[in-house]
Image (tube, rainbow, N blue to C red):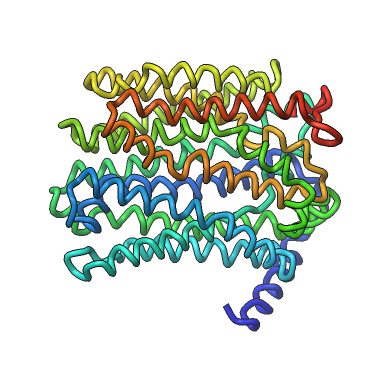
Amino acid sequence: MSLSDVANSSAAEHDSQLVNARDTKIAPGEIAIGVIIGRTSEFFDFFVYAIASVLVFPSYVFPYVDRLTGTLLSFAVFALAFIARPIGSMIFMAVDRNYGRATKLTIALFLLGASTVAIAFLPGYRDVGMASVVLLALFRIGQGLALGGAWDGLASLLALNVPEERRGWYAMVPQLGAPLGLIVASGLFAYFAATLSAADFLDWGWRYPFFCAFAINVVALFARLRIVTTPDFARQFESRELQPSRVFETVEHQGRNIVIGAFAPLASFAMFHMVTVFPLSWVFLFTRDAPWRFLLIEAGAAVVGTIAIVISGHLADRFGRRTLVGICAAAIAAFSGFAPQLLDLGAVGEIAFMVIGFALLGVSFGQSSGIVASNFPTHYRYTASALVSDIAWLFGAGFAPLAALVLASYFGILAAGLYLLSGAIATLVALWINQNLGSGNFRETPTQANA
């Protein structure tokens, strides 16, 4: 994007502020709508790629190796976005400081959409050889950079604008985007996989969900710009000091809190992939079940996860977010010891694994994001929260499908639970450190315990 384009974008941002000028007070529900729209579009992109990394890319991009190795290579490319995401945050925070939040979001979401739709036109290995692998990796890195820039601060603004006794309820709102995105993505892939022959699906059917992802990104972009560019929201961001601070300065002053904040949700983030990407790969590789049938099971279980996320809001307001996340981490640790073997027990076992897993995931994931965000001074909160999210996804989710499939393939299905167990332990340790070893603003007050 040229300097003239940036200038035009800044002018457009100013014009949109004038058009949307109003005197009404912003309600938490209005912020919540923007958060749900943004997160659903991002997670839809995420799951479209994740499903294709199991059903399509091993045969289409890595046909020169066996199917298991191809899936492992596909998962390695999958992880590239999580590695690129913190770099994207650093780049786009600079854009935010210099050209404004609307400019940052516009560039980031167009990069996300362009990278996603480019995958829809990806040539296969049989057409262009190793160039197919290189292009897939580049497009995946583009998605990761864009996701780093898609942080709009609305989730932090929501947390600062809700009544203290309702913080748990509103904390779960951003997390609803994950199961909603999964339901739509799974449904689309299930439809094309069920109605097309295997040859047609691998030739062109798998591309349509990526086109849909691009369209959803465009709609989400305008919906989010409609919110963040209004004068009321601009004043809210300014009055709450939710402005981008310099990344290295933030890390220097809040590095300890960022590390603890990133490790606190690892149980739910590891669980996230253990009930989404990993079981699909296991069923596809090691059972005779039709992939579309398991995708429908996954979509149905995601409905259970959605309900569980909503329930987590009530539980957190009653018992405290920290207590709830700690109990869920212990439950996830127990789940890791027996549940993976359910995937080898046929349809009933698969349904049991998915329903129990999504119920646990929903309650845990619903409150895991920003569990120690109240420790950040408002001056650093905007940037620090973005970095916490990036690092947590990198360590908790980026390598989860790869690690779980390696463990399960070479040491048996129960071994896949080891990755999940490590995430649960990391969460419990992080919560313990935050509770007992904090100092200054790092130590929670009784009021913050429910934040």
Answer with the quarter of the image where residue 28 lies: top right
Coordinates of residue 253 in the picture (x, y in percent): 79, 49
Coordinates of residue 446 in the picture (x, y in percent): 82, 22
Residue at image position (24%, 49%) is 70
Q: Nearer the viewer, residue 167 or 137?
A: 137
Is residue 397 placed above or below 1 in the rendered structure? Answer: above
Is residue 398 placed above or below 62 in the rendered structure? Answer: above
Coordinates of residue 213 in the picture (x, y in percent): 42, 55
Residue at image position (50%, 65%) is 111
> Is residue 358 found left or right of 68 in the rendered image?
right
Asked if residue 187 shows in the view, the reply is yes
Is residue 179 placed above or below 151 in the rendered structure? Answer: above
Residue at image position (48%, 46%) is 43
Asked if residue 222 shows in the view, the reply is no
Residue at image position (42%, 21%) is 336
User: What quarter of the picture does the N terminus occupy?
Assistant: bottom right
> Is residue 406 found left or right of 258 in the rendered image?
left
> Is residue 42 found left or right of 301 in the rendered image?
right
> Is residue 341 found left or right of 46 in the rendered image?
left
Q: How many marks?
A: 0
Coordinates of residue 280 in the picture (x, y in percent): 30, 36
Is residue 264 placed above or below 202 in the rendered structure? Answer: above
Answer with the quarter of the image where residue 150 lies: bottom right
User: What quarter of the picture does the C terminus occupy?
Assistant: top right
